[in-house]
Image (cartoon, rainbow, N blue to C red):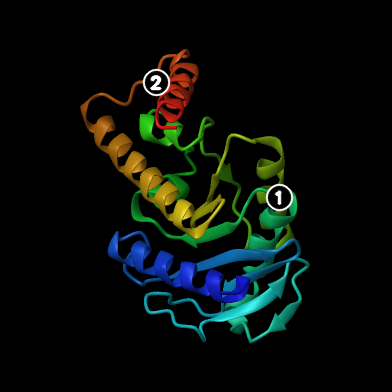
Amino acid sequence: MDNVSRAKTELIQASRALRDAGLMFRGYHANLSARISEDAMILTKGGNVAHLDEDSFAVVRIDGTVLEGEVAPAQAEIIHMHAAVYRERASVGSVIHTHAPHATVFAVAHQPIPIVYEPLVRFGVTETIPVVPWAPRGSDASVNGIIDIVKGHPGVSAVLLANHGVLMFSRSPVEAVQLLATLDEAAELILNARLIGGENPLPNEAFGQIEQRMREFAGAEK
């Protein structure tokens, strides 16, 4: 299977996982991409991604040039949102944007999501999930806001787009979905915790201790 076919298969599986987990909210709106080379990606070409198939994608260079297929006009504005992350972070293999319901509450409220939920730390997320100030979707101002965070915060694997939704990025579509599910779960738990007095931070030493425990058990499995 070549890189393009593999990426399509992984993104189709990712979209189904997002749909089944309720992470696209009611309209099934999202956009997903996967890197296929140093300078190109596969990108969903329409807004509703609940039922993707092999023809649901375009091949796009990370400078924004569409190489194969067509991107719907309403979707074209999101190309640079994905491409910017790939340009700034070589380790990223997939970018997913959705309106995950609980995380988007924080985006609408312009409130960052604190890292108080241990499973996020186990995914390597060690910094508060920040909010990119509102600007029209895909505009230079919006994309530059994303770039500033991606470059300046190596412990961040997602950003909240003010008044809009979530942008998640990770090594693969599968991992991006897992991270997004965990982030939305964390957001839901924080919202519920605030009904009974509010969330409490992890101890400062927790981050190092969790990393050490994971290393110990990874070594024991070898």
Q: Residue at x 66, y 77 (%)?
A: 59
Query: Which of the numbered marks, if any, corresponds to residue 182?
Result: none
Distance, label 2 to label 1, CA atoms, is: 31 Å
Q: Position of residue 6 (x, y in %)?
A: 54, 71
Q: Residue at x 65, y 50 (%)?
A: 146
Instruction: From this view, report whether residue 130 is shown above or below residue 167.
Output: above
Q: Position of residue 14 (x, y in %)?
A: 42, 64
Q: Residue at x 55, y 44 (%)?
A: 157
Using the rendered image of the protein, determine whether residue 23 is visible from the camera's viewpoint. yes
In the picture, the quarter occupied by the C terminus is: top left
Residue matched to label 2: 201
Question: Which quadrant of the view contains residue 36?
Answer: bottom right
Precedes in sequence: disc 2 or disc 1: 1
Residue matched to label 1: 90
Question: Which quadrant of the view contains residue 4?
Answer: bottom right
In the picture, the quarter occupied by the N terminus is: bottom right
Q: What's the amino acid at mark 2? A: Pro
Instruction: From this view, report whether residue 124 is shown above or below residue 43.
Output: above
- Residue extending farthest to the left is 196
In front of the other: 135 or 124: 124
Q: Residue at x 49, y 37 (%)?
A: 112
Instruction: From this view, report whether residue 89 is shown above or below residue 215.
Output: below
Which numbered mark, 2 or 1, is in the foreground of this view? 1
